[in-house]
Amino acid sequence: MLKVGDLHVSYGNVAALRGVSIEVEKGEIVAVIGPNGAGKSTLLLTIAGVVRPARGSVMLEEGSILGIAPERLVTRGLSLVPEGRHIFASMTVAENIRLGGTGRQDKPAVAQDLERVLAMFPILRQRYQQKAGQLSGGEQQMLAIARAIMARPRLLLIDEPSLGLAPLIVNQVYEAVAALRQSGVTVLVVEQNVHRALAVADRTYVMNSGAVTMAGRSAELKSAEGFQEAYFGFRGAKGAVA
Ligand SMILES: Nc1ncnc2c1ncn2[C@@H]1O[C@H](COP(=O)(O)OP(=O)(O)OP(=O)(O)O)[C@@H](O)[C@H]1O
């Protein structure tokens, strides 16, 4: 579904990605974990066409998508839920959700998808006519995911869905992410919360200082030899990754 090869990205003289390669198979949930500043968001933003790499390749289903603008990538089946959600606070929940389907011609299917996201996030149905700015952080995260789903992505990129949310709300958000698999959406999620990422993802990449330092099946990764070093970049205290 997605093949990223040898990506190099710099912001001025800060090297954010130093030769990152990852692959995501159709139907998988794949996580990218790593500490602050590892380059996780930069990786997602580069795949989504927001940031231009100095070098490397990004292939979506065999075709290069490098240099294609984010709004055009949506029509190619790739949507991004950015960190910080970026919902429109002064618009209603309904208006925000409908924005995700803008540009789609298949109106009956849009109506079906609307029902699907409201079934997935019942709280959004309850808050349907409220201003999005009145929602809690967790509800806004759900709204951002719902809006992205309305574009019918085949590949959904999600940046730090648990950021700043209470554990109970994080559960709901992650239940929704897990449920996306049933609707045939492939997911690449960036997460600082190692426990959540490993619980939801089939496979996980560990990043540190702009490079992939470890990768494997999530179930095996946490207890794998060298995981602490891969995550922290040095031998961290045993059990330090929660
Ligand atoms: N717009 C920018 N301008 C300059 N440097 C940046 C910019 N965005 C990110 N960086 C730097 O690039 C590196 C990678 O940052 P990035 O946000 O991709 O990491 P991250 O793993 O997503 O971290 P976090 O979890 O804190 O968002 C860091 O050193 C960061 O300071």
Image (cartoon, rainbow, N blue to C red):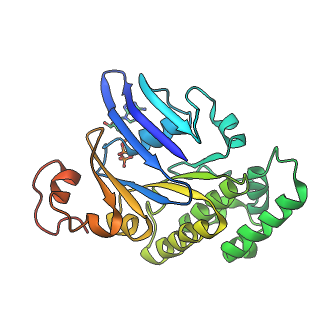
Residue 164 x %, y %: 43, 62
Query: Is 214 above or below relative to 17?
Result: below
Q: Residue at x 44, y 60 (%)?
A: 163
Which percent across, then down, holds residue 90? 72, 53
Say if residue 127 shows up in the picture.
Answer: no
Give the x, y percent position of residue 209: 25, 40
The image shows residue 159, relative to residue 194, as above or below, that is: above
Classify residue 232 as left or right of residue 14: left
Tag count:
0
Q: For residue 17, which quarter of the picture?
A: top left
On the question of residue 9 being in view, the answer is yes
User: Which residue is more in the foreground, 66 or 196?
Assistant: 66
Q: For the point 59% across and 51% down, which residue is it? A: 155
Q: State which quarter of the image contains the C terminus.
A: bottom left
Residue at (63, 36) in percent of width and height: 70
Up-down: is 111 above or below 207? below
Give the left or right position of residue 73, taking residue 18 as reference: right
Q: Is residue 153 left or right of residue 129?
A: left
Q: Position of residue 92 (x, y in %)?
A: 76, 59
Residue in the picture at 47% in, 71% down: 170
State ligand 1's quadrant: top left
